[in-house]
Amino acid sequence: MPVYDAGSKLLILGSFPSVKSREVSFYYGNRQNKFWKMLAAFFGQPVGESADERRAYVLAHEIALWDIVTECEITGSSDAAIRNYKTADIGLVLSGADIRLILCNGKKSYEIFSEKFSGCGVPYRLMPSTSPANPRYSEAAWHDALRSVFPRFEG
């Protein structure tokens, strides 16, 4: 389920939860994933370890989280293994929050979002995946995108 509230200004969309994320029942659960470290560096505030602390953290920083794929056939955690998927109802978040930008965390998220929701009326961008499997991850790219929504932070 998505994490958002009426104050959310940014929606970050992953593809589908990794095995580790499914084990902890929250987004970006693999300790090697750079997502939470990247947010902590940008906002200059540490992120807790528990799902409740992380949920509170993103909401306090006006961020919504969800995955574009809600159900699929998958072996392991690789986006390339996603088959026969169902997509999230993005309209749920867009109607319940003031989303100004959507950041797609990785190519698979971006491809599916572009195919299904490109006409949603909210700008969206492909971001380098924060997955530990991505050698082309760029914290600077993420910080630049975050700064476009949250200019008060230096990152």
Image (spheres, rainbow, N blue to C red):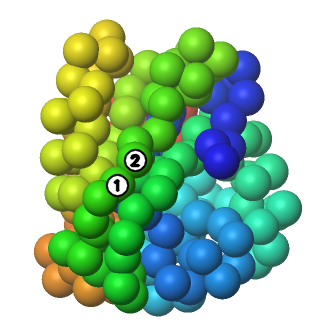
Determine which quarter of the picture holds residue 31.
bottom right
Q: Position of residue 30 (x, y in %)?
A: 53, 84
Residue occupying the point 17% across, 83% down: 135
Q: Which mark is residue 24?
A: none
Q: Which residue is mark 2?
A: 86
On the question of residue 151 being in view, the answer is no
Q: Is residue 128 left or right of residue 12?
A: left
Residue occupying the point 56% across, 47% down: 65
Q: Label 2 vs label 1: CA separation? A: 4 Å
What type is the residue that disc 1 sits on? Tyr
Q: Is residue 135 above or below residue 118?
A: below
Determine which quarter of the picture holds residue 45.
bottom right
Instruction: Single out the residue that lies furthest toward the right.
Output: 52
Circle 2 Cα neighbour tier, 10 Å, few/some/many (<14 / 14–19 / ≥20): few
Q: Which residue is mark 1?
A: 85
**CB of mark 2 within 8 Å of CB of mark 1?**
yes
Q: Closest to the observer: 1 or 59?
A: 1
Residue occupying the point 31% across, 11% down: 121
